[in-house]
Amino acid sequence: MIITTGEAEAPALVERAKSLAEEVGCRYVTRGGQSLRRLALKTGDEDVLVVLDGHVRLGGPNRAVLEFHPSMGYVRLKRVLRGDPDPMLEATKMQEGDSVLDCTAGLGADSLVFSIKGGESGSVTALECSFPLYVFLKEGLRSYQSNLKASDDAMRRINVVHGHHLDYLKSLPDNSVDIVYFDPMFREPVTESASINPLRHYANGEALDEQSIREAVRVARKTVVLKEKRGSKEFSRLGFTVPERSQSKITYGVISIDRTN
């Protein structure tokens, strides 16, 4: 993957792009008025991250473009700030100050909601195994300006980590995180989405395995939660309990941790 700027190569953006490239081990390429397609063909890199003023963009030849935006995460965040319930937070039993490991960060919407609930005393680690998505999310969360300080602060608090969830879970001590959360990419999209459809090109499409869930149960202190389509066989296959009254297209399976035995 290469990192560049928009066509307006302002000095501050160039420095930001160079710094990011050095941080994550990518190559910075001067835009020089060239199209992204030409840059990609010239460098032999299909993935191009574009650093812009207040946001970031990911794309490449013959691909839809991902532009960072908190999307529904922002809508849900504002609801949480108003005191409205959020099904994910209810399923995880999250409280202010809790620690969360989001094993499938994607575009970071769920991590953002966790971060606003956890507050300054909480912690959220957003784990992403796709390297382009990891860099995209890392830079997006620390540069995006939403015009809502609480939202921007919540984004800045999220720790974005590159790695596979199983490897990362294995590295953690027993009972070291309050909540472990999985939101794997659905095989069949529930709805068409301008933000989610381009994501499918980069996201890890593999199914969760039993070993990952065992490791999650070992690590979690409160809950392990799986987001899936209602009626999905993944819940029973992996040992999750689903609320009987759930009628939403999307629901949350829960493994509650009991350390008293």
Image (spheres, rainbow, N blue to C red):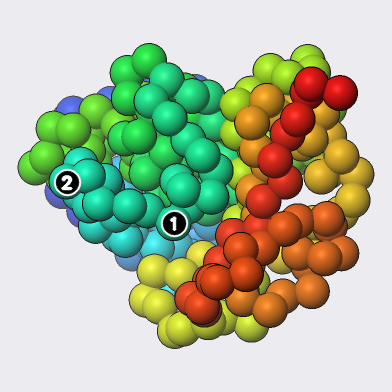
For the C terminus, the image quarter is: top right
CB within 8 Å, label 1 to label 2: no
Q: Please, is residue 243 above or below residue 178 in the view?
A: below
Instruction: In this rendered view, identify the residue nearer to me: 86 or 58.
Output: 86
Q: Position of residue 214 (x, y in %)?
A: 87, 39
- The amino acid type found where label 1 is placed reads Pro
What residue is at 62 percent from the left and 69 percent from the top? 244
Instruction: In this rendered view, identify the residue nearer to me: 190 or 98.
Output: 98
86 left or right of 207 in image: left
Q: Visible in this render: residue 256?
A: yes
- The amino acid type found where label 2 is placed reads Arg
Q: Position of residue 138 (x, y in %)?
A: 44, 36
What residue is at 24 percent from the left and 57 percent from the top? 75
Most distant residue in the right direction: 211
Q: Visible in this render: residue 127?
A: no
Residue at mark 1: 87
Place residue 237 in its image quadrant. Answer: bottom right
134 left or right of 49 in image: right
Place residue 179 in its image quadrant. Answer: top right
Residue at mark 2: 82
What residue is at 35 percent from the left and 34 percent from the top? 117
Q: Position of residue 17 (x, y in %)?
A: 34, 34
Per the image, label 2 sits on a secondary structure element best described as: helix
Per the image, label 1 sits on a secondary structure element best described as: helix
